[in-house]
Image (tube, rainbow, N blue to C red):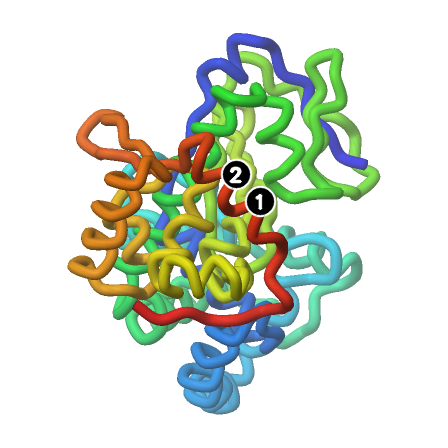
Amino acid sequence: MGWWQINADTLAGSRFVLSPLAETFAALKLLHLGSAAHPGERAWLNRHRPAYRTRLAADPVTAHLVRAGLGKDWIADFLTPTPRDREPFEEGVARVRAADPGRARAHLTVALAGPLPAVLDRDDLPERAAALLEYVWTEAVRPDWDRRRRVLEADVVARTAQVSRGGWAAVLDSLRPGRTRWLGDNRLQVNLHEYPPREISGAELVFVPITPKGGWVSWEEPDRYAVIYPCAGALTDPGARAVPASLGALLGSGRAAVLVLLDSPLSTTQLVAVTGQGLGSVGRHLRVLLDAGLVERRRAGRSVLYSRTAAGEVLVKAAGPAPGPGTYRS
């Protein structure tokens, strides 16, 4: 397994960061592999994958580049520069474009775990990679970036609340279950690969959510390290957290859906993004749930966060598990 040695100050100073570039690279991986994690992702693939495949068919060099760059067990480093706080997509992709061609070829060799194909022995690989990322951003990510951003923010809010409830160890264990884990003795497992440990004490450490399933790690030695991880499934696919039929019959399906989601604090805006319900509907549901004593609210910075009360917990647990995956309407 791969792990990083960190000290208490590094962990205490770590933070969550949103990255349009990381989200776009994750979308590129999803387009290339074509394997959907839930129905919403399948619908997205159906909309965008045919045009993506047509684009690669017309550009064989870039098609070879993507296949090599994604590798089998390792992603070519120059494709995934370490995310920076508040960095817009345009600045992030500029770092991909500015990569040294010789280093890009070396990174591809590592990802391939073998020699570089002759078709990729050229100096325009960073430019081609940047152009493809710009295409994915423009055509497939930017049109619904506001929704994606709200989902990412919802995940960060939930993880931050988890720190206060269970400490950093619980959060790290849940980022990529089975892959990330707090090992104790200041060691953070970041993947399952047998690579030498890295000493990153004193460096900047960030955690970056993405909406597609998957994840990776990246670094700019010796100053910056990042763990990119997938949002909780219930945030990216609300239907995965189905509403028990008895709870839906009691409260109404839309209101019950809001209550079920509030096991972690969320804002009204985040609930709109996660549930797909309208702002007015979510607001009405929250007022009823507040009046009934099933949820409570508190201010965190500029946001007002809602979460279940003890009475709300009892009601959800008493309703029992849902019979299977489902959807709900406002």
At 16% across and 59% down in the image, what residue appears?
280
237 above or below 228?
below
SS at mark 1 in the image? helix
CB within 8 Å, label 1 to label 2: yes
In front of the other: 274 or 194: 274
In front of the other: 19 or 253: 253
- State the image coordinates of residue 159 (x, y, percent, origin top left): 48, 34
At 27% across and 39% down in the image, what residue appears?
290
Per the rendering, the mark at residue 314 is 2
What residue did someone put label 1 on? Answer: 317
Quarter of the image that includes the C terminus: bottom left
- State the image coordinates of residue 261 (x, y, percent, origin top left): 44, 49
36 above or below 230?
below
164 above or below 207?
above
Q: Quadrant of residue 273?
A: bottom left
Per the rendering, the mark at residue 157 is none
At 28% across and 38% down in the image, what residue appears?
86
SS at mark 2 in the image? helix
Q: Residues within 10 Å of mark 2 (few under 14, many from 20)?
A: few
Q: Is residue 242 visible?
A: no
Disc 1 and disc 2: Cα gap in Å?
5 Å
Q: Quadrant of residue 55?
A: bottom left
| Residue type of the residue flagged with mark 2 | Val
